Image: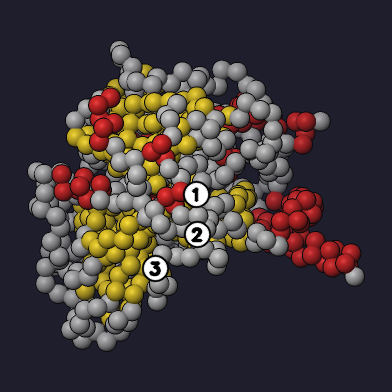
């Protein structure tokens, strides 16, 4: 029966399924390699700022491992949830072509229950660049669970710079000494989170550059380099809500890529990295080695005298260094009362039109500025409001409240009443409300979205399943005349964009990826309080060529709970699931060889 085919299968039932699946994909197997990962997601003890607390580790690591693959590879990640609550992993910037089933957010997936395992399988189709993954529900990212995701160019595609001598991933982000469940409860109780306790770099606290601000005994990150060599630094802001200014003392940072797009190569002495954003820099070790150098990430748009503790400091150590770093940190931009510096810096980031990326043709061959816009949405956020006695965040006056049944599953089973398709294209008039209203995107349409930030702090917005073109930003209210300022030639394509307080940012996106896709505030408190919406993109033709079928191991919940097979928690034993894929793969190859012989 149709329903029976779609039931979830526990890990112990995977070998036969894997053999069958691999037999079906043998024609493309040799061309598109598979990469397998087993992840045990669990609590581990750490004290990054000197206070013992539980953090979320992957295979005992905090931060988690870096996934390093190449364009068009298939990625198989078996996740064992060893937390005491449900879990989902989302892939920040991985476009999941035709496959929102693997997106790892509540709109598309049921959470993985505690003690269960679930295997993600997707292809990094036609992408390159620097991304990261993280747990998407329950405010869990505030406790860690994140890691890097690198997609390399295929050998046949030229990279627009010489191969660096090393590749360094840096996770920077604000951090609280409180447990993430306590932070979550504070938000549920209508409170602000307050000032963070510090900034971590790769899960570690700051180097003791100041004995008053930094206690003794804090473990800090050290980056080891050799003089004269050039290194690629991939910097990700994985924090909760703080924009950070990133800089390396006495070193220029040549920006070359952001979130899957090669950029016009420009040197920066510092760059603002907002929550959820990722950048790649080339840094040449061209200084003398009289001492080590500071790597700094400090809070932006705040009163620096009060927020001085919210600063991350790592050490850049030359192999022939003569001594430790000392003295004051390199200065941040001095523009607390003048936000134009940061906005002009953001505007200076341009698409490298002559570089290839995932394909041989140059990035600039897609002339987005000449495409007619088919849908326009102005998404306005305001400071949190009280709705039905609860503090909530809104877009266009609506605070999203996720249903028990994921939206994409509801579509698959034609369930009624799970959501509506009436999300307003302009802010609602009247009192704010909670809702499950979706944007009804037109397949192969070209959508213009204007994020209007009427709050008092910087917000970052992200769209799953797509890269979009950042074409404009300015202070004040967006109007139709604002289109005259758009960059229709080399606006950078990325998946997360900042929106300054009292300002707007405009993006253009080609809706060519079928599925239901999350548009959200990357600021974790805003997202948790409801500042998100989903875009539904459906091909009106009845074909399976534009979207992959529901996976055989799909989890079921809400109104579809009856289709879920129970899985006895296996814990460590369950993490052999991806090993069964590998065993089955070898079996298929043996069968093929026997057939050839």
Q: Earlier in the sequence, mark 2 or mark 1?
A: 1
Residue shown at 63% from the left, 38% from the top: 547
The CA distance from mark 3 to mark 2 is 16 Å
Q: Which mark is residue 151?
A: 2
Residue on which disc 1 sits? 94
Verify CB contact (< 8 Å) between mark 2 and mark 1. yes
Q: Earlier in the sequence, mark 3 or mark 1?
A: 1
Q: Position of residue 198 (x, y in %)?
A: 24, 55
- Of the two numbered discs 3 and 1 in the rendering, the one whose residue sits closer to the viewer: 3
Residue 544 visible to the viewer: yes
Q: Position of residue 584 (x, y in %)?
A: 76, 60
Q: Which mark is residue 37?
A: none
- Taking 305 as reference, is 46 left or right? right
Q: Nearer the viewer, residue 94 or 415?
A: 94
Q: Secondary structure at mark 3?
A: loop
Residue on which disc 3 sits? 161
Q: Nearer the viewer, residue 561 or 296?
A: 296
The CA distance from mark 2 to mark 1 is 9 Å
- Taking 538 as reference, is 172 left or right? left
Q: Position of residue 483 (x, y in %)?
A: 29, 31
Residue shown at 36% from the left, 18% from the top: 433
The crowding category of the residue bearing disc 3, from other C-alpha atoms within 10 Å (few below 14, some 14 to 19, many at least 20), is: few
Residue shown at 29% from the left, 48% from the top: 274
């Amino acid at each position: 029966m149709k329903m029976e085919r779609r039931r979830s299968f526990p890990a112990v039932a995977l070998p036969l399924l894997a053999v069958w699946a691999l037999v079906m994909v043998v024609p493309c197997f040799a061309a598109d390699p598979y990469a397998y990962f087993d992840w045990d997601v669990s609590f581990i003890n750490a004290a990054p700022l000197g206070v013992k607390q539980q953090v979320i580790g992957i295979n005992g690591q905090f931060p988690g491992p870096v996934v390093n693959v190449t364009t068009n590879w298939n990625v198989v990640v078996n996740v064992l949830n060893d937390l005491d609550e449900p879990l989902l992993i989302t892939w920040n910037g991985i476009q999941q072509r035709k496959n929102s089933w693997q997106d790892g957010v509540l709109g598309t997936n049921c959470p993985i229950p505690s003690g269960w395992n679930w295997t993600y399988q997707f292809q990094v189709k036609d992408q390159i660049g620097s991304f990261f993954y993280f747990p998407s529900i329950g405010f869990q990212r505030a406790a860690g669970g994140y890691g890097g995701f690198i997609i390399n160019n295929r050998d046949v595609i030229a990279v627009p710079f010489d191969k660096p001598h090393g590749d360094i991933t840096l996770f920077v982000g604000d951090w609280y000494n409180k447990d993430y469940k306590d932070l979550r409860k504070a938000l549920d109780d209508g409170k602000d989170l307050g000032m963070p306790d510090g900034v971590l770099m790769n899960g570690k606290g700051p180097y003791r550059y100041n004995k008053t601000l930094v206690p003794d005994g804090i473990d800090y990150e050290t980056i080891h380099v050799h003089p004269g060599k050039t290194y690629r630094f991939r910097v990700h802001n994985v924090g909760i809500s703080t924009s950070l200014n990133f800089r390396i003392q006495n070193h220029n940072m040549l920006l070359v890529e952001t979130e899957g797009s090669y950029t016009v190569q420009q040197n920066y002495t510092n760059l603002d990295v907002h929550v959820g954003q990722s950048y790649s820099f080339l840094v040449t070790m061209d200084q003398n080695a009289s001492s080590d150098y500071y790597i700094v990430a400090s809070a932006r748009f705040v009163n620096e005298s009060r927020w001085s503790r919210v600063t991350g400091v790592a050490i850049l150590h030359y192999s022939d260094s003569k001594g430790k770093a000392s003295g004051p940190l390199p200065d941040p931009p001095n523009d607390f009362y003048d936000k134009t510096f940061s906005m002009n810096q953001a505007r200076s980031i341009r698409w490298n039109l002559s570089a290839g990326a995932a394909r041989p043709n140059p990035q600039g061959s897609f002339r987005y500025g000449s495409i007619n816009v088919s849908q326009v949405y102005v998404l306005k956020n305001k400071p949190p409001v009280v709705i039905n006695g609860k503090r909530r965040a809104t877009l266009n006056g609506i605070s999203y409240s996720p249903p028990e049944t994921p939206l994409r599953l509801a579509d698959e089973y034609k369930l009624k009443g799970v959501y509506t398709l009436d999300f307003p294209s302009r802010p609602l008039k009247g009192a704010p409300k909670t809702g499950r209203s979706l944007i009804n995107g037109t397949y192969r349409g070209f959508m213009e979205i204007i994020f209007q930030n009427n709050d008092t702090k910087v917000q970052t917005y992200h769209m799953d399943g797509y890269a979009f073109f950042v074409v404009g930003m300015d202070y004040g209210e967006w109007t139709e005349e604002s289109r005259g300022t758009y960059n229709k030639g080399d606006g950078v394509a990325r998946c997360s964009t900042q929106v300054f307080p009292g300002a707007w940012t405009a993006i253009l996106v080609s809706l060519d990826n079928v599925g239901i896709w999350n548009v959200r505030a990357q600021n974790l408190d805003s997202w948790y309080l409801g500042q998100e919406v989903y875009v539904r993109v459906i091909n009106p033709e009845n074909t399976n060529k534009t979207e992959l079928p529901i996976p055989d191991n799909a989890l079921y919940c809400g109104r579809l709970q009856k289709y879920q097979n129970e899985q006895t928690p296996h814990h460590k034993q369950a993490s052999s699931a991806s090993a069964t894929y590998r065993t089955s793969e070898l079996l298929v190859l043996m069968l093929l060889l026997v057939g050839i012989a």
